[in-house]
Image (spheres, rainbow, N blue to C red):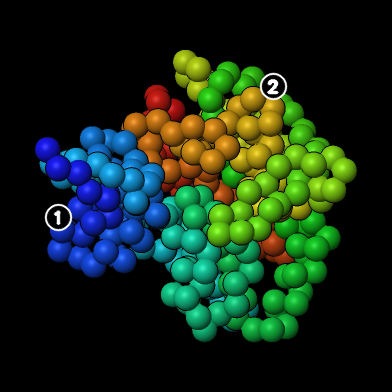
Amino acid sequence: MAKDKAYKLLAIQENISNKKAKELIDKGLVTINGKKLILARGEISDQVVFKIKQIAQAKVIFQDDNIFVVDKPAFLNAQEIADKFEEYILLNRLDKETSGVMMFAKNEEFRQKAIEEFRKNRVYKEYVAIVEGKLIDEQIIDLPIATIKGKTARSKIDKKNGKPAITKIYPNLVEGNKSKIKVVIENGRTHQIRVHLQYIGYPIIGDGQYGKTIPQVQRVLLHSKITKIFDYVFEAKEPKEFYHFGF
């Protein structure tokens, strides 16, 4: 039984370029027997059968003369969404595997006003997450976060050099050893929710960077559900992945 690099075998199976195959793996879209393939350059058997997850399209939630809002699907990063709507100006970012509300300004005057709202922490940002463990008490996590930039950003709690970050946790449902929670954040540091939840012992399911992955979930189960800015209220429905585990 021969072996070869995963991206090369995927390219052969799907009749695509090696570059495209590597991109699909790096996005987290490729599975083998229900498990997400992590290493594009890892060597595996040439007998494996790959399955590729199709990325949903970004859905328009609302627009007027000042603002354009979409429901971002998982597996696309913020810049890829911005490139799809390049006539508008991106106002907020979500991690690649985080879905939900993303906003764009349609003019510079509105962008400047919106930036001021973010700066003064007057934008309401509500998420839903499914985490490991039985989380039954409301909590406020007030711990500074520092981020190391690179090919892949990584954040950590850093009480000396970190920037302020506040995350409020509201239990919703518990099923077995897993909990569905509402999360409201102030600030908005890189990976803030993921880092804070991991730090208190409730990592988000599917988060390979700050927790662990499980076979039946191919993404971080974190969704930006409701955002309020000025007099606007935007809501993105929870994706189907959030109805696993009996929730």
Q: How far apart are marks 2 and 1 (CA)?
A: 49 Å
Q: Is residue 235 left or right of residue 166?
A: left
Q: Can residue 208 be seen in this view?
A: yes
Residue 70, percent across and down? 49, 64
The number of numbered badges drawn on the structure is: 2
Instruction: Give the number of the mark in front: 2 or 1.
Output: 1
Q: Which residue is drawn at 12% across and 38% down?
A: 1
| Residue in the foreground of this view, choosing between 180 and 154 | 154
Q: Quadrant of residue 102?
A: bottom right
Q: Residue 34 carries which label?
A: none
Q: Residue furthest front?
A: 2
* Residue on which disc 2 sits: 137
What type is the residue that disc 1 sits on? Gln
Residue 98, percent across and down? 51, 50
Q: Which residue is drawn at 71% across and 52% down?
A: 147
Residues at badges 2 and 1 in contact (C-beta under 8 Å)?
no
Q: Is residue 5 above or below residue 157?
A: below
Q: Is residue 243 above or below residue 56?
A: above
Q: Which residue is drawn at 38% across and 44% down?
A: 38
| Residue in the foreground of this view, choosing between 37 and 168 | 37
Label 2 secondary element: loop
Residue 139, percent across and down? 74, 29
Q: Which residue lies furthest to the right in this view?
A: 160
* Residue on which disc 1 sits: 13
Label 1 secondary element: helix
Q: What is the crowding at mark 2: few (fewer than 14 residues within 10 Å), some, or many (at least 20)?
A: few
Quadrant for the C terminus, please. top left
Residue 221, percent across and down? 48, 40
Q: In this view, does 191 lie to the left or right of 33?
A: right
What type is the residue that disc 2 sits on? Asp
